[in-house]
Each structure stands twice: as C-alpha cells, then as structure tokens.
Image (cartoon, helix red, strand yellow):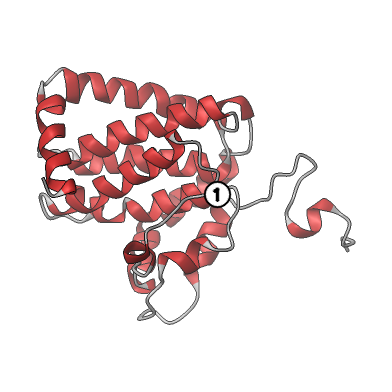
Amino acid sequence: MNSPADPAADGTGSDGYRNEGIRTLLALFEHGDPAEHLPLRHILQNLQQSAFGVFLFIAILPSFIPIPGVGGAVSGPLVVLIGVQLLGGLSRPWVPGFIARRGPKRATMHRFLGKIGRPLRRLDRMLRPRMAPLLRPLPARMFTGLLLILVGLLLSLPIPFTNYLFGFQLLLFALALIERDGALMLFNWVAAVAAGMFFGLGSGQLVSHTGQLLQRWTGG
C-alpha cells in the first residue's frame, strides 16, 4: 500500500507530474447517466497539467459531425481560443462563462469514445511523459498555441473534406498535451506546419478567409 507521502499514491511522479493521461480522460465520461449534461467548467475544474488537452479534446468533437460547415464553425473558434491562451502564456485555460456553462451530454461522449476507445487504449501503452522541453517551457507552449491557431483557422475554412483531417490532427495535439508526450508533440508541429503550407498558403485561402472569419467572430 502506498503511504500518503508516496508520490505514486496520488498519481504524482517524482518530477511533479500528476498522471492525468488517457485513462483519466476515459474515466471522466465512462460512468453515469447518459442524459447528463457535462458543463465544461465541471470537467476542467479538478484537472491540472492536462486541462488544456482535455479542453481541446472536447472542443474538436463537433468537427467529427458529418454535416458540412457545422463542425468547423463550432470547433474552429474554440481551438483558436485555446491556441491564443497558450500563445499568451496561460498555465490553465480560461473559459468564458457562456462556454463554461455548456458542454457535451455524457451519451455524446459515450458514442465518440465508443468509436475511438480501443485505439486510445492502445495509444495509452505507447504514449508517456517524455521530451519535456517540447512541452513545458514557455516558448514551446507558445509555439504550440500558434500552431493551434493555424489549424483552428484551417478547420474554420470551407475547404471540402478536411473536417476529419484537421479534427484528427487536433486530436493528436490533445493527446500530446494530455499525456505530456513531447515526441508526439514534435510530430504535431511538423504536421501542422505542413498542413498550413499546403492547405493555407499553398491554396491561397488562409489569408483571404482569415479576415472574413475575424470580422464574423468580432461582429464587424
């Protein structure tokens, strides 16, 4: 039995990392009334290092809705919000009240996790806290935030057949943040830069549509 002084007793390692990985994510949603509404503030309130990752995980759920234009319009601004906060150096996510009061139904999470639960459990055996310089230092978190803004904007654009692509890419970002896996984050950095060059600058849509999106989001 672990003593209270044992770091493993509460899932906290010798380096101060508290284990809030994929198993914690699954445990948040696996049990309970399927009709229960899960406000975002309640989901995030007890999380520490993984709060941004779980926020991102929930934010991308609409991007997997098979209705053109809907997923990106909902998920894109949320991803950009997360990216702006990381770019600004926040250590924990700030969630506006009108968003904090909202959240998925447990049944929605059950369906989504039912589709990806098996791959997540396999990833749980592969991913682990490593390469901390790609996650913890402020410059690394700011660069991750910048790339999340980029991919969030791409997700918001009317680029055909890309919702699932960007949604999956953002899912990997979320898992890297949740598991504190710098190796996966490095892969995400490379993939996000490539996506920005190919779909954004390469297609010429990113610059033109970004101005339109900003006007729409700010009510201009």
* Residue density around tag 1, few if under 14, some if 14–19, many if 20 or more, within 10 Å: many
Percent coordinates x, y for residue 179 in the rendering: 57, 43
Quarter assignment of residue 95: bottom left
In the rendered image, the quadrant that contains the N terminus is bottom right
Residue 218 to residue 104: above or below: above
Q: Is residue 216 left or right of residue 88?
A: left
Q: Amino acid at mark 1?
A: Ser
Please state the horizontal and vertical placement of residue 172, each as a whole percent of the image: 41, 39
Name the residue located 37 percent from the left edge and 70 percent from the top edge: 101
Residue 131 seen: no
In-front residue for pair 23/37? 37
Question: Which residue carries the number 1 mark?
Answer: 50
Report if residue 147 is visible in the image: yes
In the figure, 35 relative to 196: above or below?
A: below
Q: Quadrant of the C terminus?
A: top left
Determine the secondary structure under disc 1: loop
Q: Is residue 4 left or right of residue 197?
A: right
Where is residue 203 drawn, in percent x and y? 11, 21
Question: Which residue occupies 32% across, 50% down?
Answer: 60
